[in-house]
Structure formats: structure tokens, C-alpha cells
Image (cartoon, helix red, strand yellow):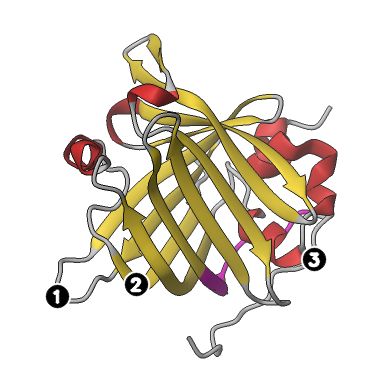
Amino acid sequence: MTDKKRQPVIKVALMDQWNDLADIVKQHYDITPGTPSNMVIKGVMDEVYHSPIAKLFLLPSRIFGALVPYKGTNIPTEVKNWTTTDNLSAMFWHRTLDFPNKPAVVFKSRMEHVQGNEIIEYVRYGMGIRMQMSVEESALIFKSIGYVWKLGGMTIPIPAWAILGNARIIEKAISEDEFFIDFNITHPIFGKTFSYAGTYSIVTSTSTPTKASTPVKNYAGKQQ
């Protein structure tokens, strides 16, 4: 039996749907926990938005290392993804957003498979968002199903309405070497509270693709 922890996190959650992903989206997530892999993607956020009600959550969210405290358009962004030999379950994220005339915003997290099509993305101090994975028209869909807070040996569930609301993320190909990410959080009472959207490409990768995937290309010479 294949050890699921030695496959890409998103591939384990999607199971057979993994093969339905667009190649460039598949390449983005084709890094395997337990192996030394590094990937860099770069692009521009068309817009980063938060509503007035979201401001109430920005300070506590930054304590946990989540979200982005500024609004703006045309924000250069770099995302580093990696896996390591000493962690058999996680895909790591390091996002850097360069807002004009402001300090760079860094947003770190890790993704782990939980069960079935469910993953959790954890930020600092054990706070995490539970998400179900699916594929629609070759695009990757993340749909949140609540939040959790790991404290010692306990996992405390937190309903979406108690924070910013429900998240939905779409990652879809727009060409052979570019993909578009659209991230929205909507509160059941207050409406849209947070969102960002942008276009990216893979600029470097030292990952080893799984057999079912198209080999990752190197787009280091692509103009941003």
C-alpha cells in the first residue's frame, strides 16, 4: 500500500480528481512531504481588499500571522512553497506582498491532509482553517468548513461566523505557464470581508514531479 503521507498533500485530498487538474495548477502543488522540495511563484495581486468590519479582526489575525493588514491594487507578490525530509505531512508556504510605501507583509502557513478531501491550513500558535478540496473544470477549489485552534493536545472547533466567515479559493490555469488565484471570505451576516486575486507563474522549482504529473518547467526567464 502506498504511504499517503509520501504524496503531495493536495493529491491525497483530491484522490482521482488530481488527474483532472490543469497541468500548471498540478505543477504548483506537486511537491511531496518527506522530500526536499522548493518552489517559487511570482505574480501581481490585482487587488487586496478588506471590509470595514474586517478591521476588527485584522489585529488578532496578525498576532496569529494570518491575512494581510493593507488594501491596495497591483501588489507584487512572491510565494515560496517547500517540503522537507523531517516533516512527512506538511506543505509549507511563505508569502511576501510588497505594498508601496509600507513594510513588506509576510504570511506564513503550512497545509496538512486530515481525512478524505479535507485539509487544514495552519498559521501561528495552532490556529487553522479547515477546507474541503475539489476540482471544477480543471480548476482547484478550496472551500472552508470552519476553523480550529490546537492547544496542547486539544483541538477546539471555531465556527466561521465567529471570525471572518467562509472562505472559497479558486486556482485556475489561464495559459500553459500562468494561473489565476481568487480568494474570498464571506460572512453570513456582514457579507464579503476579505479578498485578493492575482496572476502567477512558477519561476523556479527543485521538486520531483510524481509519475502522474507533467514535469515542472522552469520559467526563470519569464518577464513579470
Mark 3 neighbour class, 10 Å CA radius: few under 14, some 14 to 19, many 20 or more:
few
Residue labelled with disc 1? 101
List x then y, in percent, for residue 37: 55, 57
Q: Is residue 178 left or right of residue 214?
A: left
Q: Amino acid at mark 3?
A: Thr
* The magenta segment: 199-210
In the rendered image, which quarter is residue 64 located in? Answer: top left
Residue identified by numbered label 2: 73
The residue beneath circle 3 is: 214
Q: Residue 199 in the image: x percent, y percent?
A: 53, 71
Residue 93 at what x, y percent from top left?
43, 51
Identify the residue at image location x=34%, y=22%: 162
Image point 42% across, 69% down: which residue?
45
Mark 3 or mark 1: which comes first in sequence? 1
Give the residue type at disc 2.
Thr
Q: Is residue 12 above or below residue 198?
A: above
Q: Amino acid at mark 1?
A: Asn
Q: Is residue 217 visible?
A: yes
Task: Please tell me whether mark 3 sits on a helix, a strand or a loop.
Answer: loop
Q: Nearer the viewer, residue 147 or 222?
A: 147
Query: How far apart are the alpha carbons under marks 3 and 1?
Result: 40 Å
Q: Is residue 57 above or below residue 30?
A: above
Q: Going from the N terminus, do you reach mark 2 or mark 3 first?
A: 2
Find the distance from the CA under tag 2 to the CA under tag 3: 33 Å
Q: Is residue 72 magenta?
A: no
Residue at 83% of width from left, 55% of height from top? 211
Q: Is residue 1 above or below residue 30?
A: above
